[in-house]
Image (spheres, rainbow, N blue to C red):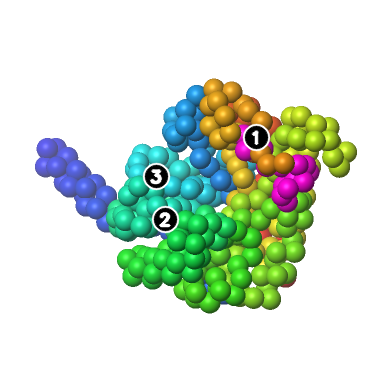
Amino acid sequence: MKLLSLFSVLLFSITLFFIPVKNDSVQVLGNRVLLNNSPYYIKGICYHPVPKGQTTRDFETIDQDLELMKEAGINTIRIYAPIDDIQILDKIDDAGLKLIVGFGYNQNGIFDMLSGTYLDYIKKYKNHNAILFWELGNEYNYHPEWFDGTIQNWYNALSTATDLIHELDPNHPVATAHGDIPDSQALKSNPNIDIWGLNVYRWDQPQSVFREWKAVSSKPVYLSEAGADSYMKIAKAGFAQGENQKAQAVANAKIIDAVFQYAHINSGLAMFSFTDGLWKAGNPNQQDVGGWAPNSSGVPYDGAPNEEFWGIVDIDRNKKQTFEVLKERFVNFLLSNKTN
């Protein structure tokens, strides 16, 4: 009996040793992102969870947040800075979600491009199953002042970093998040970018950007940011001034519908954002009204991006009206019906 038990333990150990490690395949083919050789459509959310009263990111609510994301049909999380915590990455993977991992240019040497430490992160986590692709920068084209007044300096750094990542990790594509449609300078300077993310705020009608994209590139494109906030700084378009969840819900419904209508051109979108950010425009213990002057931007419907009102849930994780709008569309969307 003891000999049989020893044999059983040995057989079980050998079986465990030969169980293949789960490692999804991610690649680009034509204008599509492929996951395990099938088209992958990003139904995403931008995620930077800063608790009430704090000013830095914290994942204390990750379990609750992942449940809400799954309920909403979200399959992809876009983050602005890497998550250096294997337990959090494992939770995201266990929930069946994928990560778009963003790297900043100058983040005081913390996994940033300027110091080169972003490569340390990629080396450490390139085999983690949660990773969908790497993303460099976030609409830096709007800020040449960050690059000695010459935006070409950013494009050069972007191109160099892209090539270095390809050498280090050939198994994940490289993207950048660009402010709206890239011009010829941006495209010519970065021929090796695999996927272009576009942060697009064109009222509630982003579809024109896809027609423009089709004319300049055949690479995959997705909206790395899109959406509306839930505060009306002025009364406009039939929506009352003040906190207005209906205005946000109506705008986001139209934005998502427009993106899905052009799913044969694009690879999805990441809605901005998961939760309201009380740290952005004033006292982090309360929700403050901020934003630019009305009618000064393409944000629906007042033209004023009130920074602390962008969540599909509020800071306490109560669902806003737009949560149900997003859920209805994300859960029911089928790419197979949209590729003609």
Task: Indicate whether residue 297 is drawn in magenta.
Answer: yes
Q: Residue at x 53, y 77 (%)?
A: 188
Check if mark 3's residue and mark 1's residue have beta carbons within 8 Å. no
On the rendered image, what quadrant is the C terminus found in?
A: bottom right
Residue beneath label 2, please? Answer: 105
Q: Mark 3 and mark 2: span between their CA atoms?
A: 16 Å
Of the image marks 3 and 2, the number of the one nearer the N terminus = 3
Of the image marks 3 and 1, the number of the one nearer the N terminus = 3
Type of secondary structure dominating the magenta stretch: loop
Q: Please tell me which residue lies in front, 56 or 170.
A: 56
Residue 197: x, y in percent? 57, 60
Residue beneath label 1, please? Answer: 290
- Is residue 173 at all visible to an observer of this figure? no
Q: Which mark is residue 83?
A: 3
Q: Against 171, is 100 above or below?
A: above
Element marked by disc 3: loop
Residue 9: x, y in percent? 19, 43
Of the image marks 2 and 1, the number of the one nearer the N terminus = 2
